[in-house]
Amino acid sequence: MRRALINGRIHCLDDKRTVAEAIAIDGNRISEVGTNAEILALMHEEELEAVVDLEGKVVLPGFNDSHLHLLSYGYGKTIADLEGVDSRDSVKEIIRTHIEKNQIPPGQWVGAAGWNNDNWDDSRNLTKEDLDQISTEHPIYAVRICGHISALNTKAMEVIGLNRNTPQPHDGHYEVDEMGEPTGSIAEMMNLVYNQIEEPDIEAIKSMILRTCQDASRVGITSMQTDDFDTLPGRNFRNIIAAYRQLIAENQLNVRVSEQCALADLRRFDEFLAAGFRLGEGDNFYRLDTVKLYIDGSLGSRTAWLLEDYSDDPGNQGFAVYRDERRLFEVVERAHRMGTGVVMHCIGDAACEQAISAVEAAQKKYPGIKPRHGLIHAQILNDDLCERMIAAGIYAYIQPIFIEYDLHMAEERVGAERIKTSYHWRTMKDMGIEMSMGTDCPVESFNPMLNIYAAVTRKDLDEEPKAGWYPKEALTVEEAVDGYTFMAARMSGEEDCKGRLLPGMLADLVVLDEDIFSVSPERIKEISVAMTIVDGRIVYANATS
């Protein structure tokens, strides 16, 4: 089927920054961009009903979120939602209501996610004492907004076998009180919980994917680069891959997905390969892309791994997932040798240093192989780390929307000196570090307008501080949009078919109801999507636009 969009401002985002009036689509590819007359001349009379009058609206390549957790978002809609809750008492009430509403029987797991103790008068983490007040008959877990800290009640601890005699795991940590008893607060240990919960079947996974994609289409997202393998109970990557492939066969998947495959060690890597999967395989709708690794935690929970102590918590340098760095180096080397990039969650400078060192070691051993490696977040850096990233060709996957929350606590966490080389996107860009835009959803909303707004204003969503937070580190609107389109495509090696509106490229477009390049920067967060097109098909149309 052929389709045409006319009377618009078509931003091709090519090197010439071409802005056209109209664009033609033939099947799932762009066939031509040009004037209204040129595009209409391509259409046969019987195809005129497929002509869309944009009435001056702006068209961009579809947004590509370069790092989020698609299934985590979908799964979160099936458990108790604690996002925005302002007290621990409210947490208890919401989980109680969830149990009652869903008639969850005693003995069955109860899940919750999204709490943020930094927003409470009492900023302590949730503990078993809090959750025991909800129920002692249901095993309960509640995941913090960052995804790196969780709370368990006593029943849950019994089920997973967590007690004072449990050795600290090599890739996680549990908190103990002054008597040496676990408090129920755990870091990077949710795999022990998920191993005990009945895993969703393929149909349930498909439902989660479709729910997420439906919401993503409303905000103009046409591609996602997602870390799904460790998201669900069972950690069953076979069923997850099968769910995506079935949706494609059923012609239901409306967002293109590149899987950032969570393969934390060689055992998990071997399991993946033994199941017959290969990195890089797939099609334009679902592809097994990079290897995804976690190196540390989060700044909000003080589990990001720092080279020096937290400024507001002397004696604490955060948490290293790979305390035995050989395990990290082995995985990075294997992926590199196979020609596959590794993307690593690194927030603290110590985490970034370890990740960069792993890439450097693999490159030194196999210099002729050149996959694309990246640091996800790369929040706390220093000049030496930036120079090493450039020398090694390491990309940065940034999440500007993080400053909505982080600008209110980051300097307190890391101090006045380290903050100068933190969240410093302008400096990174000018140094030559290639960056893409993502949100880490569900940690933050995957609405691209909020992310672009944060990148160019350096303000929270209440437009504070008035002058911006370290405003010299802001990106331009053009740079932020490029990070969401062409640069995001580069991260997954798909810049030959995504991120530009040019003949031959995939027909993935977003139509905005206002001109993102001419409105005030503060207005960007209010822009809504009028239409989203994926593979030449209209997957979302706002009836009011």
Image (tube, grey):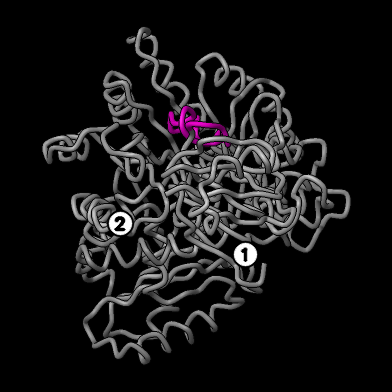
Apparent side of residue 312 relative to residue 339 in the rendered image (left or right) = right
Farthest residue in the front direction?
A: 45
Q: Amino acid at mark 2?
A: Asn
Image point (65%, 51%), residue name: 451
Q: Can see residue 269?
A: yes
Residue 239 lies, with reference to residue 107, above or below; the image says above
- Residue 417 position, x and y percent, is 74, 34
Q: CA distance from mark 2 to mark 1?
A: 43 Å
Q: Does residue 495 show up magenta in the picture?
A: yes
Crowding around mark 1 (Cα neighbors within 10 Å: few <14, some 14 to 19, many 20+) is: some
Q: Which residue is mark 2?
A: 251
Residue 393 lies, with reference to residue 239, above or below; the image says above
Frontmost residue, 27 versus 158 = 27
- Residue 540 position, x and y percent, is 52, 62
Frontmost residue, 32 versus 225 = 32
Determine whether the residue tagged by mark 2 lies in a helix, strand or loop: loop
